Image: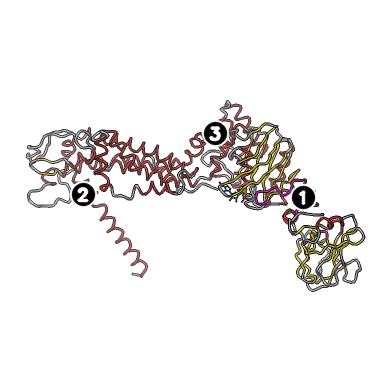
Amino acid sequence: MSAKTLRTTARTVVIALILALFLFPVYWMITMAFKPQPQWAPTTGETYWFPESPTFGNFKRIFGGEPTDESGLGFLTSTPIDATDSIITSLIVAGLGTVLALLVGISTAYGISRFRAGGKLLPFAILQLRMFPPIAVIIPILFLWTYLQLNDTYWGLILIYGAVTFPFVVWLMRSFFDEIPREIAEAAIVDGCSNFGAFRKAILPLVKGGLATTALFVFILNWSDYLIALVLAGSRVITAPVFLSQIRSASTGVEFGSQAALALILILPPVILAIAIQKHLVRGLTFGAIKR
Amino acid sequence: MAKIELENVWKRFGRVEAVVDLTLDIPDGSFIALLGPSGCGKTTTMNMLSGLLQPTSGEIRFNGEVVNDLHPGKRNVGFVFQNYAIFTHMSAFDNIAFGLRVVRKQPAETVEREVERVAELLDISHLLEQRAADLSVNDMQKVAIGRSMITNPGIFLLDEPFSNLDAAFRAYMRAEMKKLQRELRQTMIYVTHDQVEAMAMADHIAIMDLGKLQQYGTPDEVYNSPANRFVAHFVGSTTMNFLPAELGATDGSLELRLPIPEARPIVLEDGSAKLLDEKGERGHTLGIRPEHLELLDPANERADARGTVLLVEPLGARNIVHLRAGEIDFRVVVPPTIRPRVGDALGIELERKYVHVFDDMTGKALR
Ligand SMILES: Nc1ncnc2c1ncn2[C@@H]1O[C@H](COP(=O)(O)OP(=O)(O)OP(=O)(O)O)[C@@H](O)[C@H]1O
Ligand SMILES: [Mg+2]
């Protein structure tokens, strides 16, 4: 073997190993979702790398169904559960949180980019909001939310999701706006548009790609949040990740199989969204192609 | 159609004075070039005319009406930007139609008819369906011009519209724009830092430097009677020769003595001597364009000074001869048939008629 093929082979092996490392948990989750209970919680200590006699039992279980394990053990000692409400809750709070972050963030970003709003300091003041670990501020926010009676409400979560992700929107969208020569908006204004009209008719269409990318990114952040939803809500308003963490039964403890099934369902919305906006996504990631 | 007046217009950005006390009258239907080096306030002036910027003080009037606070869209101006501002996400057609369709909400037939009319004028009818992003740079600029023409603006503002184009196309567009302006009779203000462009196109040239208007006149005036040393230096394809001169008077004539050994004093007999009375003992500079110098045999007694050839630049239609006389270097423009060799000794004569004299202190032209 020549040195070159050796190098190519070595590189392929390394890439494969890294991929395996990252993809194994995904593989484990997918297979787990289809394993019957004795295989995800084996009493024999055996490891099932692949589900033998795959089943939809876990999926039925998380949507209130009776377990249909051949084992007969089933979920005898557990009460039926239903994840539907939590998924809807998650869609609402993550979705509206994203909309809120986008509305506020895009306006802020455009103001900063086009009108130098807030001078040099504002962009960094916004950025530093992201420099705290959320755990450091979540307790004070809990007090604040309790005082405002936002605790355990939809609006409480929507507001906090909007607030937490809006710095991302500002920084991402600002870089997209910066790419656009100021003359584009000015041309529209000379044509008779107002400032807002120029923004809507001339600028927004140009950043569609960036906007779609930003929206997806922010939605994924909100959708996958666990900590905030656990602390600021969790008894009346339960999001899917919180619901997921609480699936357990007396006989088996944590129900890994049902959790895997729900997790598998939960990765669907981001994946579907990503596919839906795929065209814009590529455009958003390769932004900067505007001719000057 | 519109007459434009600027009166004592200032624009400050914080401590930067971008436009300083600008007063300018632009007659209806005229073609004005706004000429000056980078950063002299040309774009700022245009932005104030279009309404994108408000003057810090002073008045801008269109047809006698103050427009300082009028929204850009209501001023009936067309603006072609320095960086062609076209919407790359739209087709060429939609770009040109934007002002009529999106903003003025005209019916579809009107829009179509107008876009086709403009496209015809600019010779881009075949490109209308293309996405603007896919157009060549040249065609993009045509679309940008079309965009601003569509509303039939009374005032047409062009901010260095062709600076990104290649030389050949620029020359072509220059001629086209001039033709177009003749046809449409709009008031046109054309910004450029290229004096050749300004001279070639405009009825009047306004020359700016450091935010201040230096001179406002016809191409002929700014070329032949520059108001100050800046204008003299800036205008002209080969830079004017400047030489320190000592002024003196003999019987009503002005005498200019050059710091060149054995040079003849330049005597101007046309009553210029009165300049001296006013200006006393200050330093002065003599200016003369390279095309107003004549090369002579060194023995010729018409020669004002003698020097040796340093360099010859053959430009085809003319040659530029660099000549050193004493400590002074001259540039002389001569016809292509005259092609001295480096090291040749030559005489040089200044055409009296075209001798300029500048006050060193103020830079003002005395003659
Ligand atoms: N928004 C602004 N804020 C601060 N200073 C500005 C602003 N716009 C322009 N200036 C300054 O005003 C002066 C004139 O600028 P302007 O753009 O009018 O020059 P210009 O003649 O168009 O130059 P160029 O040939 O480079 O386009 C420059 O010194 C510039 O830095
Ligand atoms: Mg400019």
> At numbered mark 1, what does the secondary structure look like: helix, strand or loop?
helix
Circle 2 sits on which residue?
A: A28
Disc 1 to disc 3: CB gap under 8 Å: no
Tell me: A7 left or right of B340: left
In the rendered structure, the residue with mark 2 lies on which chain? A
Classify B344 as above or below A33. below
Ligand 1 contact, mark 3 (Cβ < 8 Å): no
Pick whichever, A27 or A229, lies toward us: A229
> Visible in this render: residue A88?
no
Disc 1 to disc 2: CB gap under 8 Å: no
Q: Quadrant of the C terminus of chain B?
A: bottom right
In the rendered structure, the residue with mark 1 lies on which chain? B
Q: Position of residue A213 (x, y in %)?
A: 39, 43
Q: Quadrant of residue B59?
A: top right
The part of the chain drawn in magenta is B209-228
In this view, the residue farthest toward the bottom is B343
- Please state which amino acid type lies under the numbered disc 3: Cys
Circle 3 sits on which residue?
A: A193
Whether the magenta-drawn stretch holds residue B39 is answered as: no
- Please state which amino acid type lies under the numbered disc 2: Trp
